[in-house]
Structures are given as C-alpha cells and as structure tokens.
Image (spheres, rainbow, N blue to C red):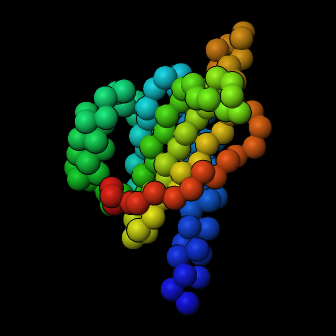
C-alpha cells in the first residue's frame, strides 16, 4: 500500500511539472545558460533568474521560500542551456518540480531550439521524465 501511495504522489507531479516547463518558455526574459526559480503561491508568481553559482542559488531559494508572504505550495527550478543528447550538444531545459508535503520532486527535461529571427526559445520534441529527487526545499 505504501509503495502505491508513493507512485501516485509522483504521478501527481507530472502535469504541473510539464506546465511549468511550458510557462518558462513563455517567460520573456528566458535565455540560454541561465538558472530560474518560480515559487507557486495563491498569487501569480513569475519566473526569477538565478545565478550560475550553486551556493548563491541555494541561499536565494531558501530565502525566497522563508520570506514569502504567502504560503509556498510548489517550487520549480529550471536550467536552460546546452547538454549532451545522444552524443550531440543541444539546447535543453532541465526542470526540478517540488510540491509542499511531498517527499519527492520530479526531474524532467525537454529539447529546445531558438528561433533565428526572434531569438525566442521554443520546445522541440517530447518531454523526458528523468527521475525523482528528494524535496529539501518545502
């Protein structure tokens, strides 16, 4: 019974995690080689750029969660950049999605391309669910 509840809870994260990835690509300030964070509260929260320094990002994420005036219900962390995909360097977006009261977060990704005439990033191909990670944030 316990195993089924864990599987179900991870399944609950798939749809909102995919949605947050799509929302990131609609964010006007998204750019390649950049980390982003988004807190989900009752209000409409926006993506915020982070640095490429892990220690600074960890402090910024913890501080944002702690100092939020509204209860943080979910958190998304995303990286837009280059990665090796099947032996070739490609643009990808890598996302970690966490929900409050869930021990596990979901890790997923998607290939992206850049429109040459606008510079806007757009998704290419299907979503790839990469696995789970421990929720240390919420």
Residue 32 at x, y percent in the picture: 53, 22
> Which residue is found at the position 58% from the left and 29% from the top?
83
Quadrant assignment, res 121: top right
Q: Is residue 99 visible?
A: no
User: In the image as oriented, which residue stretches furthest toward the bottom?
Assistant: 1
- Report the front residue among 130 and 28: 130
Q: In this view, does 97 lie above or below 118?
A: below
Residue 71 at x, y percent in the picture: 33, 60
The quadrant of the picture occupied by the C terminus is bottom left
Residue 41 at x, y percent in the picture: 40, 55
> Which residue is found at the position 58% from the left and 35% from the top?
93
Quadrant assignment, res 81: top right
Tally of numbered tags: 0
User: In the image as oriented, which residue stretches furthest toward the top?
Assistant: 117
Left or right: 127, with 59 as reference point: right
Q: In this view, does 61 lie above or below 50?
A: below
Quadrant assignment, res 61: top left
> Which residue is found at the position 43% from the left and 69% from the top?
102
Left or right: 78, with 89 as reference point: left
Q: Can residue 114 be seen in this view?
A: yes
> Which residue is found at the position 22% from the left and 49% from the top?
67
- Report the front residue among 7 and 86: 86
The quadrant of the picture occupied by the N terminus is bottom right
Residue 103 at x, y percent in the picture: 41, 68
Left or right: 19, with 36 as reference point: right
User: In the image as oriented, which residue stretches furthest toward the front?
Assistant: 87
């Amino acid at each position: 019974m316990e195993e089924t509840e864990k599987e179900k809870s991870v399944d609950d994260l798939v749809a909102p995690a995919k949605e947050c990835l799509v929302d990131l690509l609609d964010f006007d300030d998204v750019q390649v080689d950049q980390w982003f964070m988004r807190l989900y509260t009752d209000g409409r929260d926006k993506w915020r750029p982070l640095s490429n320094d892990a220690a600074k990002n960890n402090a910024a994420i913890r501080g944002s969660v702690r100092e939020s005036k509204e209860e943080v219900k979910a958190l998304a962390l995303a990286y837009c950049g280059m990665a090796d995909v099947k032996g070739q360097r490609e643009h990808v977006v890598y996302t970690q999605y966490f929900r409050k009261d869930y021990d596990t977060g979901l890790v997923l990704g998607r290939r992206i391309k850049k429109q040459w005439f606008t510079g806007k990033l757009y998704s290419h191909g299907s979503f790839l669910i990469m696995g789970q990670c421990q929720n240390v944030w919420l």
